[in-house]
Image (cartoon, helix red, strand yellow):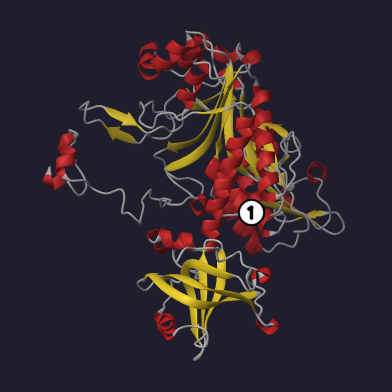
Amino acid sequence: MKRTHHCGELRSSDAGTRVVLNGWVHRRRDLGGLIFIDLRDREGITQLVVDPAATAAEQVNTAQLLHDEWVIAARGTVRQRPGTMVNPQLATGEIEVVVEALDVLNRAAPMPFHLDDTTVAEDIRLRYRYLEIRRSAIARNLRLRHRVAKLVRDFLDALGFVEIETPILSKSTPEGARDYLVPSRVHPGAFYALPQAPQQYKQLLMVAGIERYFQIARCFRDEDLRADRQPEFTQVDIEMSFVDQADVLSVSERMLAHIAREILDVEVPTPFPRLSYTEAMNRYGSDKPDVRFGLELADLSGALQKSSFRVFRRVLDTGGCVKAISPQGLSTASRRTLDAWAGEVAGFGAKGLASLRVETDGSVGGQAAKFLSEDEKRDILGITAAAPGDLILIVADTPKVVHAALGHLRRVIARDQGLISPDRFAFVWVVDFPLLEFDDENNRYVAVHHPFTSPRIEDVPFLDSTPEKVRAQAYDVVLNGVEIGGGSIRIHDPGMQARMFERLGISAEESEDRFGHLLTALKLGAPPHGGIALGFDRLVMLLAGAESIRDVIAFPKTTRAACLMTGSPAPVDAHQLEELHIRCTTGVDADSQ
């Protein structure tokens, strides 16, 4: 029987129509005379009725044998349900199909879990991922992912961008995360690397004169995982020639606003707000700030510079800072709550969390009040704008610790106090990142983004003398506190690129060995160019309202980079290893080598 309709599309206007439906048995109810079958496909559920008065005995017998998740085809006539039998929970709840013929296309063994059970452990769900995809939420996310990809392609195509695939087997140029390596059988002892990003290829395409490139690219990084990371992931990769930073930001935000409009029917104002890296850290304690709520950091360092409170003075005298957030209406927070918040900031290295309460009469009390003068308390009230009934939470430490601790705490309090509107989509650009940062472990400067990022022209004179002052022509786009993309204007001048490598401690010989192909290209007429990479999985996750990118990826890995469904990674046999000139010294195959 050839399908005529999907299970989710029939309505009362179809009454009297003869139809053929295909799908899975979602549920069967045998009422003695009548048998009701909820038939499900990707579009929804339709109720089938097997009535001995209208269905042949052989078909009734078949219906009595059905179990959950059997695959069937049914032919019958649509009829309207009686008013008392309408199911308002279903889009098809006003109708049912009276079955004339029924075919079993495939039986199903007993399910390892019921598809409606949302309490099933994640390892079981990932082992049977194809069953979980049958659940409406995962399937809906994958279809949303398809729609977003199509919107990206259509939007960029209309602007003259060309979609070009770049190689998956590439050269290892390790920087940042570890590469996944692929041994070459043809070249014994040599390895390909799976690309962490198409960075060098898209720059080479600009040298090639493509001018406007994009790719929905697969990328691979061998790094520690968490909810929004996977060893293989997807990004919307964009590069443009003859542009400046404003051009890249404009294209990106117009595309993101277009996606929000088409997917969520939400109008996102453009241009997006811009924050410098320094401003973002000072105000929000994070370079990926959630700007949907207040609780901004207030700097108390100036007011406490001469404080007699030794904890604060010691921090300030050694170059640290003292900052606070002031949650409204929480002056009555319990000791247990304050201790829990202290535990939150301790996870980021803070040695303590001082608290002040603003009493109803405007006076300041709380655990830290006795260590502060009246002038200092008055200044703190002015700086934090705290009002009666508010709480002031203070961290004193190095700027790195203070920002990380309070940046995290403001998010925790906002979540727990319901300060975040789940329906709001707040985009913000963070710009003017530092170009370099000092790596104490390796005693050298490293690139904050990557070594091909261009410095701001006015900061180039600081590159040799005070490199920490140099700002990058780099930018991140943040949505609701999640970084969904980042990019930069690239270095197109070979002299500047050589100078950058030298500043990073990469010798001329090493730079030639690792990046010689790119350096050669830059010497052969490279145009000014820049671009951005948007995390496609993260973007879809936020649009879907999902908690993890695993919820928007068809076959994700676990946090240990394993696929429970296929059992990968897995050992290979000795013959395969021999062909690749590889000997295992650990693991399952070690004894056989």
Q: Amino acid at mark 1?
A: Val
From this viewpoint, which residue is outermost toward the right? 361
Query: Is 264 left or right of 347, judged from the image as shown?
Result: right
Q: Where does residue 173 sit, x and y in percent of width and height?
A: 38, 25
Residue at x 21% of width, y 44% of height: 586
419 to 273, vertically: above or below: below
**Up/down of 543 relative to 434, above or below:** below
- Give x and y (percent) for residue 201: 45, 24
| Closer to the camera in the image, 387 or 214 | 214
Q: Position of residue 262 (x, y in %)?
A: 68, 46
Q: Is residue 266 above or below residue 439?
A: below
Secondary structure, mark 1, is helix
Identity of the residue furthest to the bottom in this view: 32
**Label 1 Cα crowd, 10 Å radius (few <14 / some 14-19 / many 20+):** few
Label 1 sits on residue:
412
| Residue 302 relative to residue 119: left or right | right
Quarter containing the N terminus: bottom left
Asked whether residue 397 appears in the rendered view, the answer is no
Point 40% across, 18% down: residue: 515
Q: Which residue occupies the extreme left position in the image?
A: 592
Residue 283 drawn at (x, y percent): 71, 38
How many numbered badges does the structure rendering display? 1
Whether residue 8 can be seen here: yes
Camera-side residue: 344 or 558? 558
| Residue drawn at point x = 74 percent, y = 33 percent | 271
Q: Is residue 509 left or right of 395 when viewed as pictured? A: left
